[in-house]
Image (spheres, rainbow, N blue to C red):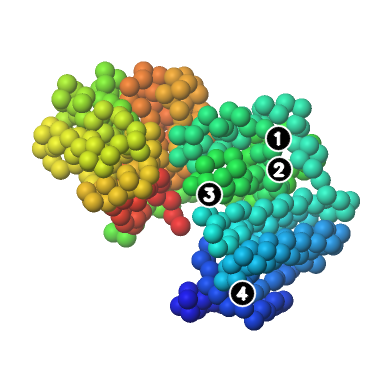
Amino acid sequence: MKKIYFIFFLLFAFGISSCGHEYIQSNDRGSVRLYQTFAYSAAEYGETGCIENFEGPLYASISYPKSIGFAEEAVNSWVYEIYNQKSEQLNKLREINPEAVGEIYLQYNAFLLNGKYAGIIINGIYNEAGMSESSDIIKTFNLDLENERFVGISEVINMDDPAKIFSLLRERILHEYPDTYTYSHRLYNISDAWLDNWVTGHNGIIVVLARGIFMPEFFGTLTVTLPYEDLDLILFSKTIPVPDPEPDPVTEPEPKIEFTEEDVIESNKKIIDTDRPFIALTFDDGPSQHTARILDILEDYGIVASFCVMGRYVEAESETVLRAFQMGCEIIGHSWGHPDYTLLSEASIKKQIQDTEDIIRSVTGADPPLIHRPPYGAINNRVKKVSADMGYSLLSWSVDPKDWESRDADLIYNYIVRYTRDRAVVLFHDIYAPTADALERIIPKLMEDGFQFVTVSDLFLYSDVELIPGEIYRNAEKK
């Protein structure tokens, strides 16, 4: 118990909280698990006020904005109300269990927009003895500083067509949290309640979704940004609250680029400049009748990709698989028959992985990379354990145009061009003709935008990301 208490104290003393203005002390001592919520980085409005208690029974570290003018009374009242409410809740529990302890941890983020508006999020967790999971605490405030008033979402964006807003929210959730696709049926029941906690951020409306309320609890707290350019703005119709654009740079002759060993890596006789963006294209569920055409397109542009193959199709398309391998593309296992691994036993999961690995090796003559992509991106602790035992890392994705759903080359193209970012893992399926159609336009466009194309293994290698067996990897973005 003393060890846990000491760790709890050190974590707060050395950087989890910068608090130190107010200190609430108790004579009771105990231990409590430390949870951390996602960390914000903006505190652009007001000063930091704190409530701290490292003595228990309610361990507390609460930071909140002070010196915020007309909004100060409302924000302070809410903070102290929450603290007192949780103290009373814990005291009632201690009447039954005198040894019970709890914790409350809150942090805040404040965005200042053009000096006229401010968006404040205060969020964190509460946990006490007997709770299997911590519960979220979330509160948002949106301030019109010039008129000294709080604003509602219908004053900021046009809500006459809520279905349009809900559709955008669903799209952004799936984009920013690809694993939610498994539970995407919930995203077709979005209502006004999903927009209860929102603030005006620099680049869009930030929506915070409490854990366990809208999606299964294991997804944790979801934070999603609705880009301003996708919204019909009201309050900001003339002045969109984004940072002032930088002046156009003076056009100068481009210097000759000289590559050094530190920033250049040679692979398949191609030079990869790690100071420029690079991505990994991945193709699932093949090989199929369309895979050869996709290889033609890749070959025409002199680039490579990674093919996540189903073992049962490899033998029939062995020439295509071998051609991809000889082109420098990567062949990754994607199960034998595409079952949901989370519904299988450990032995069945292992067989799906092993059988697929064996047939890839028999065709290419080389060991497959120690990366595996589970069907549907469905992963639980059992899948992680089997993968770790077999030495495999788990591959997910960060960009998903849902080619399997739309089967529309224009929609696929528009999505990829809009959402692809440096070091992304892009998900396609090489079993649809529209995917190949879109690819003929996507590759030259991305190349024009400066993107380079590498295999999944090289994506992580060039990004200095060490792949750990049993862990999930969605991209190789710089930290």
As drawn, the label of residue 220 is 3
For discs 4 and 2, the disc positioned in front in the rendered view:
4
Q: Residues within 10 Å of mark 4 (few under 14, many from 20)?
A: many
Q: Residues within 10 Å of mark 2 (few under 14, many from 20)?
A: some
Q: Quadrant of residue 57?
A: bottom right
Percent of width and height locating residue 23: 69, 78
State if disc 3 and disc 4 touch (CB < 8 Å): no
Q: Residue shown at 54%/59% (left/top)?
A: 130
Percent of width and height locating residue 435: 39, 23
Q: Residue shown at 51%/66% (left/top)?
A: 33
Percent of width and height locating residue 15: 55, 72
Find disc 2 in the rendering and name its residue.
196
Find disc 4 in the rendering and name its residue.
56
Q: Does dot 1 land on a helix, a strand or a loop?
A: helix
- Tell which circle, 1 or 4, labels the residue nearer the N-terminal end: 4
Percent of width and height locating residue 32: 53, 69
Q: Nearer the viewer, residue 118 or 138?
A: 138
- Tell which circle, 4 or 2, labels the residue nearer the N-terminal end: 4
Q: Residues within 10 Å of mark 3 (few under 14, many from 20)?
A: some
For discs 1 and 4, the disc positioned in front in the rendered view:
4
Q: Does dot 2 land on a helix, a strand or a loop?
A: loop
The residues tagged by marks 1 and 4 sit, at their Cα atoms, a distance apart of 38 Å
The residues tagged by marks 3 and 1 sit, at their Cα atoms, a distance apart of 20 Å
Q: Amino acid at mark 2?
A: Asp
Q: Does dot 4 land on a helix, a strand or a loop?
A: loop
